[in-house]
Amino acid sequence: MKNNQQYKEGFSENNGVKIFYRDYGPEDGDPVLMVHGLGAQLVHWQPHLISFFQANNFRPIAYDNRDVGLSSRFAATPSFVLDYIKYFLRLPIKSEYKIDDMADDGIQLLETLKIDKAHIFSTSMGGMIAQIISAQYPEKVKTFTLIASTASTPSPINAPTRAVREIMLQRSKNPNASYDEILKREIKMVSLIGMEGREVDTPEFRKETIENLGRSKDRSGYARQLLSILASKDRLKKIKKIKAPTLIIHGKDDPMIHVKNAYRMHKLIPHSKLKIIKNMRHLIEPEVLKQFEGVLLEHLKNSS
């Protein structure tokens, strides 16, 4: 484990797969396992969210899912054109690992840190992973926060908007694009899935994007993670088993995962609470967090 004035870093291991984590502390804080989305590294959790947890006596713990950041990589090169055809025809898709394996990575991280029970905070694909954690390992879960996610396997009738799909396909087919191409792609994507009207193409955004690219030089894991989502079974029956207090948060105008998915999960997860955010799309900007930080804090504190 590497110590830093602000956090501790290290690896946990699950059946040979190394998972890189960052424990922001404090050590005596109430632990929150933060499970991120498709292609996202731990550094993509924004500082305002980390600060929110720490200011309220929580201990945020973030990690790179397998195949991104500093965690273990897999070797397979997906035949994405063929798999995309299978997706539209709703035929079975094979992947090198499943969402269930990624859930086991999260559980093993808690074991490595000797944490008996944690709050699970998740977004997007991370929410899919966290649904399995919460359903299969109830003894490990204090509360479950599920943001901008779904329990269904994406299909042509329950998919991101066409503009978002096109960028996802570009990123999957061409992971080794030039920095300029990637910057243009990221600016376009965040403009689509972030708050409407919020300026994206800033010097700060460009600098941060380049730094994050430098941290993860092998970007082929995005396509394999996407295939793992498409190849995994839906969790509609599984989430009925979730026992932990659950808060579902979703943007009214989310172009990545339609808000109807939130209403469906709310019906299926026993005693869950649902908060729809009017001017939220898919991301958790500071302005968005302010709209639900009260209900989130109440959810976490009352269940601690």
Image: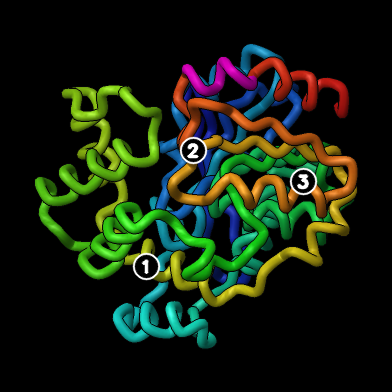
At 47% from the left edge and 17% from the top edge, which residue is drawn?
287
Q: Which residue is mark 3?
A: 266
Q: Residues within 10 Å of mark 1 (few under 14, many from 20)?
A: many
Q: CA distance from mark 3 to mark 1?
A: 29 Å
Of pointers 3 and 2, the one earlier in the residue sequence: 2
Q: Amino acid at mark 2?
A: Asp
Q: Position of residue 295 (x, y in %)?
A: 73, 21
Kindly report which numbered mark, 2 or 1, lies closer to the viewer in this rendering: 2
Q: Which residue is mark 2?
A: 253
Chief secondary structure of the magenta portion: helix
At 69% from the left edge and 43% from the top edge, which residue is drawn?
113
Q: Secondary structure at mark 3?
A: helix
Q: Is residue 179 above or below residue 228?
A: above
Q: Amino acid at mark 3?
A: His
Q: CA distance from mark 2 to mark 1?
A: 25 Å
Q: Quadrant of the N terminus?
A: top right
**Label at residue 131:** none
Q: CA distance from mark 3 to mark 2?
A: 17 Å
Q: Which residue is mark 1?
A: 223
Q: Are marks 3 and 1 in contact (CB under 8 Å)?
A: no
Magenta stretch holds residue 290: yes
Over which residues does the magenta segment extend?
287-292
Q: Position of residue 15 (x, y in %)?
A: 62, 71
Of pointers 2 and 1, the one earlier in the residue sequence: 1
Q: Residues within 10 Å of mark 3 (few under 14, many from 20)?
A: many
Of pointers 3 and 1, the one earlier in the residue sequence: 1
